[in-house]
Image (cartoon, rainbow, N blue to C red):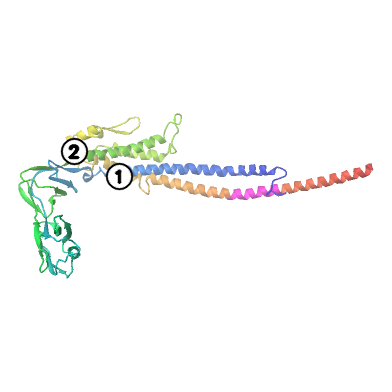
Amino acid sequence: MGMRGVSSFGFDKTVEKLIEVEKIPIQQAKQRKEKVVAEKKEVDKLQKMIADLDKAINGIRGKTDFYHLKVESSHPDIIEGIIKGPSALGTYEFEVRGMSRTDKKLAFGFPDKDQTEVGFGYMSIEREDKEPIDVVIEPGTTLEKVAQQINDADAGVRAMVINTGFKPEPFRLLVVSEQSGKEATVHIDEDTTFLEFKNQVTGRNLDVLFEDVPVTSNDNNLNELLENVTFHVKRAEPGTRVQVSVVNDLDATVAGIKEFVDKYNEIVKFANDQSKDPKQEQPGLLAGDASIRQIMRSLQQGLFGAPGAAGKYQNLADIGISTNPKTGELSMDDSKVRAALTDNYDSVANLFIRSKFGEGVAERLAQKIKEIRDPGAGPLRSKMRSLDTIIQTQDKDIATKERQLGEKEESIKRRFSSLEGQMNNLQSQGQFLAQKLGGQQSQGGG
């Protein structure tokens, strides 16, 4: 009987056990690879954490990054502003005497918008800064079609049919300049049609006093009054003086510093979790790894290097950021940081940024992170290359062992199949001899 069926001598289980023994080295090799793959995932986590720290640091390492500004207005319902870039601190006085308006023309009424003819002829539309555009009104044209023709003419105006509700002729054609200000005034010559227009609103420019100096704009925004500040005017209030200030945005600055502290602490906690006391807790997969120690030493050198600042605040502890001596994590007192910024914003900034006084914390850490992430000699890339090489070697080893297992499995099966054949032959011969001997005895007895 062959090995493909059920062995009459119980060899099947023996063969299975022998093959299982041969599989052990492969299983061990796969387990070793799984451990290295898991280590690589941990290094990937660390890489992401360092990238996040680098991003947080970039938000506070330069003067333009650290110095957050905002606009405060005593009457934000009249005028407010937004910061577009670096700007000078200061308080300014405004008075909004008149808003910019778009020019609007309103035609006399019609009983409907899509049936009654408005006559025929020509309509000339012009603006102060545009060449006239003629609109041909054909016989049978309705109010709705006139609006469409005006819009299609691309004359810098927008036409619409409105229903005023005043019967018997509630439908009227409203033509509005697409821009505001005096230069956007619209002139319409309706020629021979029944369309007669009344000047509903006259276009005009914004009228504002800035520090008692008249300023104007063709819309309700002042974009170039101060460098990198746009003022949005919301309504006119003649006689009301509005105080508008460009100030340091403490909320945004504190948030930027806190982001740096949080991202730094993530890395410290990760490193601490890797090197837990094996007698008390399960250490991490990278416990004792030299690259982790190298990275943490580098970050600590950047954080606690020689202070480059000059002024009231010399180190992080002075502004409310202390270090836990046991864990190495940073602890930030938001209220103290805010108080320090309020007291001397520039001195706090110099603790972090590159300035004429030297390199601050963020600048030093940014350089350390650049070294850590260096694709050639950086410990992160070196560690990843090492793990990738080990995994490739393990894959080749596993493939070789699996090929050898296949050959051994076939060899074992062949040997036991041959043995079973021999056993079957012996069994057949034994049965033949028994039968023969049994026959002879019966003949002798007879």
- The residue located at (33%, 34%) in the rendering is 329
Residue 236 as seen in the image, left or right of residue 413 = left
Q: Is residue 375 above or below residue 326?
A: below
- The image position of residue 373, as x and y in percent, is 35, 46
Q: In this view, does 272 lie above or below 394?
A: above
Q: What residue type is labelled 1?
A: Lys
Magenta-highlighted stretch: main secondary structure? helix
Residue 408 magenta-highlighted: yes
Q: Mark 1 points at which residue?
A: 55
Residue 407 magenta-highlighted: yes
Point out the tag, 2 or 1, that comes first from the N-terminus: 1
- The image position of residue 136, as x and y in percent, is 16, 69
Estimate how packed mark 1 is, as few (under 14), some (14 to 19) or many (20 or more) residues with alpha carbons within 10 Å: some
What's the magenta region? 403-417
Q: How far apart are marks 2 and 1 (CA)?
A: 22 Å
The answer to whether residue 368 of the structure is visible from this angle is no
Q: Mark 2 points at which residue?
A: 345
SS for callout 2? helix
Number of on-image labels: 2
Q: In this view, does 219 lie above or below 52?
A: below
